[in-house]
Image (tube, rainbow, N blue to C red):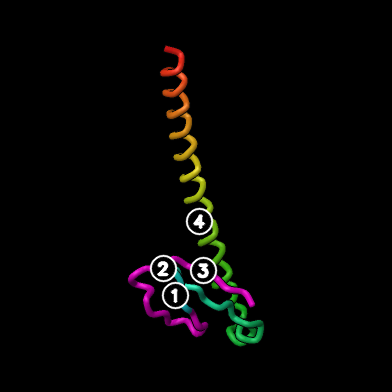
Amino acid sequence: MDYTIHPSSPSSSSSSSSSPSTKLDGYIVAKSPSNEELRQEGIDCVIQRLRQIENEHKRLLIERSKSMKDVNKKLQVTLFVFQINRCC
């Protein structure tokens, strides 16, 4: 059984989705729809769902990339300052 995890936000406290969900440590864990549920939704709804998930993954990758760049920049500054203090 597959589950999708989404950060909880005040506006998403009640979900209008037909899939059951539970709240776990500030995250909403939503059960993935079964194959039969997806067939009943129709191709247009499934494509729309796919595009939404795809966009969310892209957003998360961009966010992660920005965080990694920030961490690397801070590490470089810290190492540079450490090397200057060590030499003098």
Q: Residue at x 58, y 77 (%)?
A: 32
Mark 4 and mark 2: Cα distance apart in space: 17 Å
| Residue 60, numbered label | 4
Please tell me whether residue 15 belongs to the stretch shown in magenta.
yes
Where is mark 3, residue-wise? 5
Mark 2 and mark 1: Cα distance apart in space: 6 Å
Residues rendered magenta in the picture: 1-21
Please tell me whether residue 17 belongs to the stretch shown in magenta.
yes
* Residue type of the residue flagged with mark 2: Gly
Q: Residue at x 62, y 74 (%)?
A: 2
| Residue 23, numbered label | 1
Where is mark 2, residue-wise? 26
Please determine whether, in this image, residue 72 is positioned above or below residue 28: above
Where residue 6 sits: x, y (%)? 48, 67
Q: Is residue 10 left or right of residue 24?
A: left
Mark before the other along the chain sequence, 3 or 4:
3
Residue pushed farthest left? 10
Q: Residue at x 49, y 36 (%)?
A: 72
* Residue type of the residue flagged with mark 3: Ile
Mark 3 and mark 4: Cα distance apart in space: 12 Å
Mark 1 and mark 3: Cα distance apart in space: 9 Å
Say which of 45 and 78 sits in front. Answer: 78
Contact between labelled residues 3 and 1, with CB atoms less than 8 Å apart: no
